Every structure is written in C-alpha cells, then in structure tokens.
Amino acid sequence: MTDHPLRVLIVGAGIGGLALGQALVAAGGVDVRIAERNPDAAAWLDGYRLNINPDGSRALHRCLPTPLWEAFVATSPTPPGGISFRTEQLRELFTVTREDMIRGSTDPADGQYGVSRRVLRTLLLTGLEDRIRFAAEFERYTVAADGTVTAHFADGAAIAADVLVGADGANSRVRRQYLPHAERVPADAGGIGARLPLDDGTRAWLPRPLTEGMTLVMPPSGPASMFTSAFPGRDALTAAISDGVGLDGRGLDQDTLLDHSDDYVLWSVIADPRVLPDDAADGRALRDAALDLTRGWSPALRRLIADSDPASTGVMRFRHSTLVGPWTSTIVTLLGDAIHNMPPVGGLGANSALRDAAALADQLLAARDGAPLVPAIATYEAQMRDWGYAAVRRSLANSRRATSSSPVARRAGRAALRVRGALRRRPRQPRHATVRA
Ligand SMILES: Cc1cc2nc3c(=O)[nH]c(=O)nc-3n(C[C@H](O)[C@H](O)[C@H](O)COP(=O)(O)OP(=O)(O)OC[C@H]3O[C@@H](n4cnc5c(N)ncnc54)[C@H](O)[C@@H]3O)c2cc1C
C-alpha cells in the first residue's frame, strides 16, 4: 500500500487520452495528469468530422460525466444514412442501414454520430483544464527500483507516476521505447481527398445517397475506389448550441463550438500509392489526378471531385501498426493509434481509441480499489488487442479491396454484395413455409 492515490500519467491529450482522463477524474480517487506536446488547447487537428459508431458511442458514454455526454448527443448530428456499397455508376449493391448499425436500439448510448472534431475536443477538455500540461513533449521514461515510472520531457521536466499511459498517437514515442518491435509500416493504399460544401446549390445535383451517409464506390476494375461521407446537421447543431443544451455553466464557448460546423461531403479516391501524385502536388494537380483515376464513372461522382475546393484537397499515404504478439504487461501501457494505427478506410481508429479508454479506465479503477495493478493492465491489454487488432485487419482489408487491380477479385466482391442486397430486398417467408412435409 502507498500513502498516495494511484498516480496515472497520460501522455497525449488526443481523443483516447482525454476520454481516459475524463473517466478517471469523474470516478475520483486517482491522481490524473495529462502531458500534451501541443502548446495549447487551440492547436489540435481540425478540419473534418468523425463518424462515431455504436462501439465508440458506448465507450464515450462510459467515459463522460452525464452533462458532457448529454452535450455530445445534443451537438453531434446523426447522419440519416448508413454505409452504402455502390458501383462506379452509383447503382446500389448493398446497404448497411443506420438501423442495422444501431441494431434497433433507441438508447442514445448505442447511437451513430457525426461529430465535429472541435466539438469533441471541447467536450473532452472540459473539466480537465487543471490536469493538463501543454507544451510538454514526452521524450522517454525510466522505471525506478521502487516500481514507479518517471516521464522525461523535452524542456527538462520530469513527472513520476505509478502508471504511464502512452496515448501519444500514431508516432508514439512511448511505444518506440516500450515495444520497439511494434513498428508502423506503409499500407498498400493511399488517398486523395477533399470536401464539397453541402448547401442548396450542391444538394440540387448531388444524388441523395451522397448527401446522407457513407458510400463505398466499387468499380469493376482497378486501380482506384472511392469513399464518401456526408456530414449534414448544421441546423440541428446550431439549434442545440443556441438552446444551450447541456452546455450551460460549463464554460463552453458557443462560437468556438459553431466554428467548423458547416455541412459538407468528404470524399477520398483510394488507390495504390504508386499511382498517386507526390506530396508536393498542389490542390489542382491532386484534383486532376483524382479525375483521371475516376474516368468513365458517374458524372455526379466526377462533379463532386471537380467542384471541390482545391485548397481543401490533400494526398495521404496510409500506414498501419504491425500487430505484435502479447507482451509481458508492466506499469507502462498504450492505447489508441499508439498501438493500433490503421488506414482511415471505414472510420474505426477513434472508435477503437475510445473503447480502449473505457476498458483501461475500468481496470485502473479496479486497481484503485485494491486489485493488483499489473494483472489489471494485462486484462485491459488483452481486450484492447482483441478489438484494436480486429479494427486494423478490417481497415487493411477495406483498403486492399479498394485498390485491388484484379478484375476477378473486384467482380467477385461486387457479386457477393449484390447477392446480400438481393436477399435483403426479398420479402421474408413465413417460418412454416420453409418446413418440409
Ligand atoms: C482523414 C482521417 C479521417 C478519419 N476519420 C475517422 C472516423 O470517421 N472515425 C474514426 O473512428 N476514426 C477516424 N480517423 C482516425 C482517428 O483520427 C484516430 O484513430 C484517432 O484520432 C486516434 O486517437 P488517439 O487518441 O489514439 O490519438 P490522437 O487523437 O492522434 O492523439 C494523440 C495526441 O498525442 C499528442 N502527442 C504526440 N506525441 C507526443 C509527445 N511526444 N509528447 C506529448 N504529446 C504527444 C498529440 O499532439 C495528440 O494530441 C480518421 C483519421 C484520418 C487521418
């Protein structure tokens, strides 16, 4: 027994690290500190929204205190569509509806949300202000003979703790020291992406599915595919924020929340990195390359690309974590992208990081209450590897399918989806009709 509460140092105030901080602070009895490299709360990755799926939503519900959870639900519109698989001419192959995704649940905790990164960040930071040290760039850690861990920072500062959590994202320095064999390697895919505003003008010509949910466009031959995601709901967000739902008295700045909340469709043409322009290409060159890769596709898809603002266009070569076998658990652990980074095809990264945060919070709170600490961390790590690695495999399979140059594999994939779609549309037979006399 020590004479102080369990000291948990989280490196990285990103989605996973902040969610863990929220859960531990709300439960109490844990000395939580968060060290973030960025100079302040404003310096954070903005620019696009995140799809939070029911797994991520349940985890967020577990981590956030009730008023912040209610503010999240009120300010995060639910896209009306699900995930639709379509041909390059936009003919439907198969659709996973929103109802499929939430499995008929009416509980907001099982919901599907499109959240602005800025809104999510603001909510996750609320109440943790005095726990976070900004401009704290983690460099390395040392473990002392008494079993405590000390994190060392670029400015010479050092913080001692009983548990060190590396929540420092895809290029995690904690991981590099702790599990140097767990590398991050290039994936066989990359993407050119941009945004098109969703307004009266663009809604007039955009086909409905592209304005409502996610679409995976699967042409019959390579080398590219396309992913689109609609983020509508500014009106609902504006109404919620001006009503102050769940925000009163929490010091949340409404102007900041409304910033970056315009409706838009995000698109990404996914292809073998060898056919993508280099990183120095400007927005127009990237847009032209995306148009080249989608020659002969539906005019609406090509107009979506052509009318997007070149300034919002970027190219990205995907990378992913290698999936290393179980390691011997200690008082140093990892969560989120730091251990299971994946290509952003399918929107699973932040959701997995949130699941990690909720599971690790449960185990650390068990340790606070007397359970042995390292076995508790081992329990968390087994769970985290289970879903985190499954998400990496799924994202890699999605990106492999998207870039396959084999027409046979592509046609087989489309045929399988068509069959699923046809089975879904077939009216269900009454049970007795299938029983043979
Ligand atoms: C284009 C794109 C779209 C995406 N869309 C989705 C989506 O729709 N749904 C979804 O689930 N996921 C999505 N993702 C993935 C998602 O963004 C990540 O998986 C998620 O942010 C990981 O959270 P994290 O907490 O592990 O890391 P991060 O959110 O990256 O946080 C890491 C934090 O650690 C800090 N840090 C790094 N190094 C140090 C250091 N040395 N010292 C101190 N601090 C440090 C960073 O500044 C950062 O604040 C998308 C990703 C991309 C690129």
Image (cartoon, helix red, strand yellow):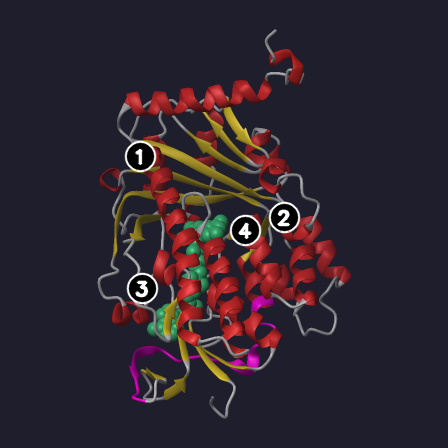
The kind of secondary structure element at disc 2 is loop
Q: Position of residue 330 (x, y in %)?
A: 34, 73
Q: Which residue is found at the position 41% from the left and 45% from the top?
A: 310
Q: Is mark 3 within 8 Å of ligand 1?
A: yes
| 3D distance between C-alphas at marks 3 and 2 | 30 Å
Q: Position of residue 56 (x, y in %)?
A: 54, 54
Q: Earlier in the sequence, mark 1 or mark 3?
A: 3
Q: Which residue is found at the position 53% from the left and 67% from the top?
A: 362
Q: Is residue 272 visible?
A: yes
Q: Residues within 10 Å of mark 2 (few under 14, many from 20)?
A: many
Q: Disc 4 vs disc 2: Cβ atoms closer than 8 Å? A: no
Name the amino acid, label 2.
Answer: Gly
Q: Earlier in the sequence, mark 2 or mark 1?
A: 2
Q: Which residue is label 4 attached to?
A: 55
Q: Which residue is label 3 attached to?
A: 171
Q: Earlier in the sequence, mark 4 or mark 1?
A: 4
Q: Which residue is label 2 attached to?
A: 111
Q: Seen from this angle, which residue lies furthest top? A: 437
406, 31: nearer the viewer: 31
Mark toward the viewer: 3 or 4: 4
